[in-house]
Structures are given as structure tokens and as C-alpha cells.
Image (cartoon, helix red, strand yellow):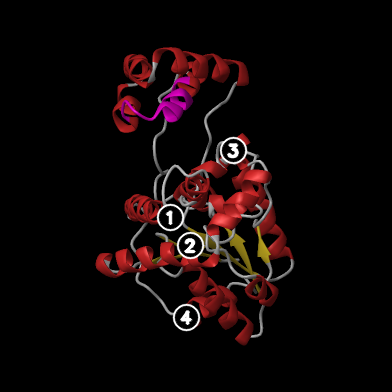
């Protein structure tokens, strides 16, 4: 059975495309279910800033892996990958077409590719994190360079979290730390990848307007509720662009104008990183929703 994956940068219309594909599947007499692969849409209460599908849209087609974490909980790619695999298997068992949609590159890749996560050890990780806190990322980078120069070069001297992860894996296995995507030939299953793209100038205009819309829709009130729900006790949810800026506005550290401008700048930067990530995927021509639906539905009887 074929999986459809709708991926791309924020603001490129992934949600609308996934819904259009699902509608086209239904028009062919089959059923479709949508699986989220946006890390921040995993969180309950983070709706405006993550541009989740509306409640009405979710009623039309079943959606999965939305609102499954509390704001104070940390997300983990390995746990997400396992749960997404379970959900997709369930969709297939029901005879429906699974549609994976989202822009979190590592989360999408963990499902689409034969992704093996390096070994972990909580005690070793804690020691390395303490060393990071005491010595800084540059020292950890030098340590990794001595053990795995290629990984040190790929990660760089500033990303302390990834340096710790690489040191943990190299120490446990004695093998080089794999950085980035697996080989593009190692798709885990039959998959149609629909990569949504928008011209850069148009995308920037969309993103700036989207941020303005977040403030019009009430992201500041949403951030206030998330603070009460414990967002500042966790690590992952706080990284969602827009919420930290809204909280800073609430606390009087910045004005609404400054919060919007900072969020716009961070959103544009994040979109550039997403574009870079998804360029690693195999190139495939864009197809309309009807064609994608036909190809997926054809696999249902296989």
C-alpha cells in the first residue's frame, strides 16, 4: 500500500494539499487518513502558532498525532517514528490511504526512510550534558573531533545538544555518528513524496502575513494559556516560533511590534532551513491531487 507524503517549508500550503488529496481519494470511492509530522503540532493548545488543521477540517478526514503531548512534555524523534509507524499500519489495516503531512524534516525522514537511531544511555547522556554545561560547546566539539572528525565537521562547534548526542553514540558503539538522512534509495516503504514549493519572494510575503495573522487570531492569549499549562517547564514546545516572542510581549520585555518582527525574521530563517533539508529528498515532479489520489488508490488492492 502506498503512503503519500506531503512535505515542504512552512507556508507552502501542505495542509491544504493534504486535504485536497484526501478529498480526491474519497471521490474515487476510497478513504484517507492524515498523519501529522510537524513536531510542534504534537502539542495540545498550540494551534494558532502552528497553523493546525481546524476542527472542522479534522472532522472531514481522520487526523492522527495532533494534540498528543502536553506543553511541558518533550518530543523525541524515535518515539514519534514508532508511533507514526503504528498509526500508519492501523490506517492500512482499515483499508484507507495514509497521508503523512508536515514540515519537520527529521520527523518526516524518520518515517519515510530506513532510519536507524544510534544507541542511547541515560547515565552517559547525563554526564555529557553536565560536561557541556561546565565546559561549553566548543570543548565538546574538540572532543568529538578527536573521535569522529566527519561528525564534528558536519555538526559544527555551536550545537551543544547534537554534539552531546554524537559523543554519546560514538562512545557507546565505537562507530562513526551518522549525520543527516540515510541513503535516498532506502525508502522504508512504497511512497509518493509530494514536495510543496513556493517561489522565495512569494513565500517571504506569505510568511510575513501569516505571522501578522497569528497576532490577529490571538497567539498572545494562546501563549498565556500555554504558560499556565506548563510550556516553560519543557524544552521542545518552547522552541516553537512565535510563542516565546508572545510570552516576552506578555511580560513587557518587548512590544507587540517587536514580537511580530522577531517572529517574522525567525520564521523566514526556519523556512530556509526546511527548504535546505527537503532538497535532499529525491526530485519528483509535482502532481495534482487527483493524480496522487489515483496512484495511491491503485495500490489498495495490491
Secondary structure type for disc 2: helix
Which residue lies under the disc numbered 3? 232
Contact between labelled residues 1 and 3, with CB atoms less than 8 Å apart: no
Which residue lies under the disc numbered 2? 215
Contact between labelled residues 3 and 2, with CB atoms less than 8 Å apart: no
**Position of residue 44 in the picture relative to residue 163 (left or right):** right
Q: CA distance from mark 3 to mark 1?
A: 20 Å
Task: Report the mark closest to the observer, 3 or 1.
Answer: 1
Q: Earlier in the sequence, mark 2 or mark 1?
A: 2
Judge whether residue 277 can be spotted in this image: no
Task: Report the mark closest to the observer, 1 or 4.
Answer: 1
Q: CA distance from mark 2 to mark 3?
A: 20 Å
- Span colored in magenta: 156-167
Judge whether residue 269 can be spotted in this image: yes
Contact between labelled residues 1 and 2, with CB atoms less than 8 Å apart: yes
Which residue lies under the disc numbered 1? 256
x and y percent of residue 132 in the render? 45, 18
Amino acid at each position: 500500500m502506498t503512503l503519500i507524503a506531503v512535505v515542504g517549508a512552512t507556508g507552502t500550503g501542505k495542509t491544504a494539499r493534504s486535504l485536497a488529496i484526501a478529498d480526491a481519494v474519497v471521490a474515487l470511492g476510497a478513504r484517507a487518513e492524515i498523519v501529522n509530522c510537524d513536531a510542534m503540532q504534537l502539542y495540545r493548545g498550540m494551534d494558532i502558532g502552528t497553523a493546525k488543521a481546524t476542527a472542522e477540517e479534522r472532522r472531514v478526514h481522520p487526523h492522527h498525532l495532533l494534540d498528543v503531548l502536553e506543553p511541558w512534555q518533550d518530543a523525541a524523534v524515535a518515539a514519534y517514528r514508532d508511533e507514526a509507524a503504528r498509526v500508519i499500519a492501523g490506517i492500512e489495516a482499515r483499508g484507507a490511504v495514509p497521508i503523512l503531512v508536515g514540515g519537520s524534516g527529521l520527523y518526516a525522514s524518520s518515517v519515510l526512510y530506513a532510519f536507524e537511531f544510534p544507541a542511547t544511555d541515560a547515565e552517559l547522556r547525563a554526564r555529557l550534558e553536565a560536561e557541556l554545561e561546565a565546559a561549553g560547546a566548543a570543548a565538546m566539539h574538540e572532543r568529538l573531533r578527536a573521535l569522529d572528525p566527519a561528525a564534528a565537521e558536519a555538526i559544527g562547534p555551536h550545537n551543544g545538544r547534537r554534539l552531546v548526542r554524537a559523543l554519546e553514540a560514538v562512545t557507546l558503539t565505537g562507530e562513526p555518528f551518522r549525520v543527516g538522512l540515510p541513503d535516498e534509495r532506502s525508502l522504508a516503504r512504497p511512497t509518493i513524496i509530494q514536495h510543496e514549493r513556493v517561489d522565495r519572494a512569494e513565500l517571504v510575503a506569505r510568511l510575513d502575513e501569516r505571522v501578522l495573522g497569528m497576532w490577529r487570531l490571538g497567539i498572545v492569549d494562546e501563549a498565556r494559556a500555554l504558560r499556565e499549562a506548563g510550556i516553560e517547564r519543557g524544552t521542545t514546545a518552547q522552541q516553537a516560533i512565535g510563542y516565546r516572542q508572545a510570552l516576552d510581549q506578555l511580560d513587557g520585555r518587548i512590544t507587540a511590534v517587536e514580537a511580530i518582527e522577531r517572529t517574522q525574521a525567525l520564521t523566514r530563517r526556519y523556512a530556509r532551513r526546511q527548504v535546505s533539508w527537503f532538497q535532499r529528498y529525491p526530485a519528483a515532479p509535482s502532481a495534482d491531487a487527483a493524480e496522487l489520489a489515483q496512484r495511491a488508490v491503485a495500490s489498495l488492492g495490491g
